Image (cartoon, helix red, strand yellow):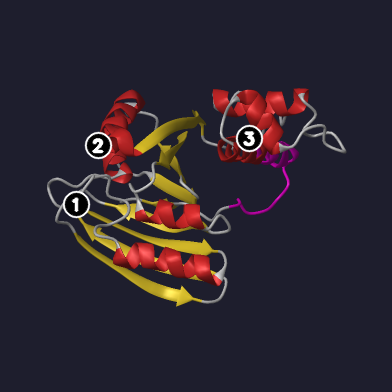
């Protein structure tokens, strides 16, 4: 099995959910389950954040002109249903069901075309960053998948490759960075070289971002992902028990 991870960073006005999360940096959304067939997609998502952030997130899902996972740039005529399963002061659970029209497209449907059936999907949405993790058999055409995905998102989002490797399982060297995207490894190395991990820190995220000439939010995101990857490698190498952060993966039939 192979693991494929990437992120879409949406431009303002292109995705209602991304716009809502960008206005509420404390909010996070992760998938609890995600399934897709050729003509349907349904999923359950768990959101956390302040009451104001959760209200904005719920409104983005419920009041959007068309389903948030559709990559079409305008209303494509699909049928969508979103229901609030739970809404408390600090958590929100949403169920969404989407029936495609001939002009609709989404990440799972592009993946099914090029990577085959039996896929496992996991997503995280933080600010304008929408991170996807896909487990697949390894027999599909990853290059064609990314070409079609880039064409589908167009100018609405920047595509960042995070990782493509064997799916986690066997223990390995906890210090191995070969599974990091080049941007993540570069950010991590720069952070070490400039004393970001010293105590006290020689630089903060803003200063390091200015040195690397990247937005502060982008650098913080890359460092979080690099740290997450190395932490999982370390725990896997030590064979310590415990669930994966971010929720489980679900099969797509």
* 49 sits left or right of 138 in the view: right
Can you tell which mark lies on residue 113? 2
* 179 sits left or right of 149 in the view: right
Between circles 1 and 3, the one closer to the viewer is 3
Is residue 148 placed above or below 26 in the rendered structure?
Answer: above
Q: Residue at x 40, y 62 (%)?
A: 44
Question: Label 1 near label 2: C-beta < 8 Å?
Answer: no
Q: Is residue 192 magenta?
A: no
Q: Label 3: which residue? A: 226
Mark 3 Cα within 10 Å, few/some/many (few <14, many 20+)?
many
- CA gap, disc 2 and disc 1: 12 Å
Q: Residue at x 37, y 43 (%)?
A: 119
Residue 252 position in % (x across, y down): 34, 50
Q: Which residues are magenta?
A: 229-245
Residue 64 position in % (x across, y down): 29, 61
Mark positioned earlier in the residue sequence (1 or 3): 1
Q: Dividing the image into 4 quarters, which one contains the N terminus?
A: top left
- CA gap, disc 1 and disc 3: 35 Å
Mark 1 Cα within 10 Å, few/some/many (few <14, many 20+)?
few
Mark positioned earlier in the residue sequence (2 or 1): 1
Can you tell which mark lies on residue 39? 1
Mark positioned earlier in the residue sequence (3 or 2): 2
């Amino acid at each position: 099995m192979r693991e494929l991870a990437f992120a879409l960073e949406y431009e303002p006005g292109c995705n209602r959910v991304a716009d809502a999360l960008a206005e509420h940096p404390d909010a996070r959304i992760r998938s609890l389950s995600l399934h897709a067939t050729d003509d349907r997609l349904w999923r359950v998502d768990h959101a956390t954040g302040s009451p104001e952030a959760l209200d904005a997130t719920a409104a983005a899902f419920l009041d959007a002109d068309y389903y948030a996972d559709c990559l079409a740039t305008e209303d494509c005529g699909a049928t969508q249903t979103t229901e609030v399963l739970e809404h408390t002061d600090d958590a929100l659970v949403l169920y969404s069901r989407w029936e495609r029209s001939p002009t609709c497209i989404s990440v799972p449907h592009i993946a099914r075309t090029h990577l085959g059936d039996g896929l496992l999907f996991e997503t995280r949405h933080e600010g304008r960053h929408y991170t996807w993790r896909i487990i697949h058999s390894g027999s599909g055409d990853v290059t064609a998948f990314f070409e079609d995905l880039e064409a589908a998102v167009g100018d609405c989002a920047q595509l960042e490759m995070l990782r493509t490797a064997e799916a986690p399982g066997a223990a390995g060297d906890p210090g191995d960075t070969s599974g990091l995207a080049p941007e993540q490894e570069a950010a991590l190395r720069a952070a070490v070289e400039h004393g970001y991990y010293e105590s006290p820190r020689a630089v903060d995220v803003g200063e390091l971002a200015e040195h690397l000439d990247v937005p502060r939010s982008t650098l913080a995101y890359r460092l979080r992902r690099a740290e997450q990857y190395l932490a999982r490698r370390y725990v896997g190498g030590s064979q310590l028990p415990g669930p994966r952060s971010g929720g489980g993966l679900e099969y797509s039939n």
